[in-house]
Amino acid sequence: MSSKYKVHIVEDDRTTRRLLENVTSMLGYDVRSYEDGQEAWNSFELERPQIVISDWKIPEIDGLELCRRLRESMKESYTYFVLVSAQKRSKPNLEAAINAGVDDFLKKPIGSDDIWNRLRVAERILNFNHQVRRLESLIPICCYCKKVRNDGDLWEQIEQYVNERTGADFTHSICPTCMDTHVRPQMESYKKSLKDKQRASTD
């Protein structure tokens, strides 16, 4: 197991919370724990955890609302959310949890192996998500004409590509390096050709 991920535990039952703390800490994660949803939410906004293990029924803000808020606020990065519940996994409960954005479930009473298995899945999904985001950030660009390949596998000017995704417009200018390397030599060459023509016409 990797120690790079932050795990936040939200559980008001002390025995269950201690178990979750001990197992996740033993596996090398950076662990924080909270007794109520409001305290956890305040911490989420600052800490940005990668994994959250939360009981469904907790004071202040319940686990589903906690997950909903997290999904709405943390769109730039992904948090794997595990919901803990003593309730039976009925169809209405399952649909409510999935609609809130829950990724996985732990049923009470919780065993150490159950926690370990869920964390293994969480880490696998997070690693995959990171790889996908990294690949999405790569922009295929032609090394000759500098056109960019878009999502439809068509090549277009980089200005159009950026404008379609960000709304940004471009103004064209010339950088100092290109001015010295390209523009000034062309201007000097043009001036020289004019002088040569003038000289030829007077001879």
Image (cartoon, rainbow, N blue to C red):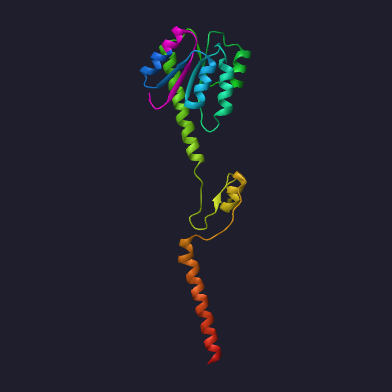
User: Residue lying farthest bottom?
Assistant: 203
Residue 117 point in image, percent of width and height: 43, 18
**100 up-or-down from 179: above or below:** above
Image quarter of residue 68: top right
Q: Quadrant of the N terminus?
A: top left
Confirm whether the magenta stretch covers residue 127. no
Image quarter of residue 96: top right
Residue 111 point in image, percent of width and height: 43, 10
In the figure, is residue 8 to the left or right of 60? left
Residue 82 is at least partly visible in this image: no
Towards the viewer: 121 or 13? 13
Residue 164 is at least partly visible in this image: yes
Residue 18 point in image, percent of width and height: 42, 10
Towards the viewer: 140 or 15? 15
In the rendered structure, which segment of residues is drawn in magenta? 1-19
Towards the viewer: 153 or 163? 163
**44 up-or-down from 194: above or below:** above
Image point 51% across, 84% down: which residue? Answer: 196
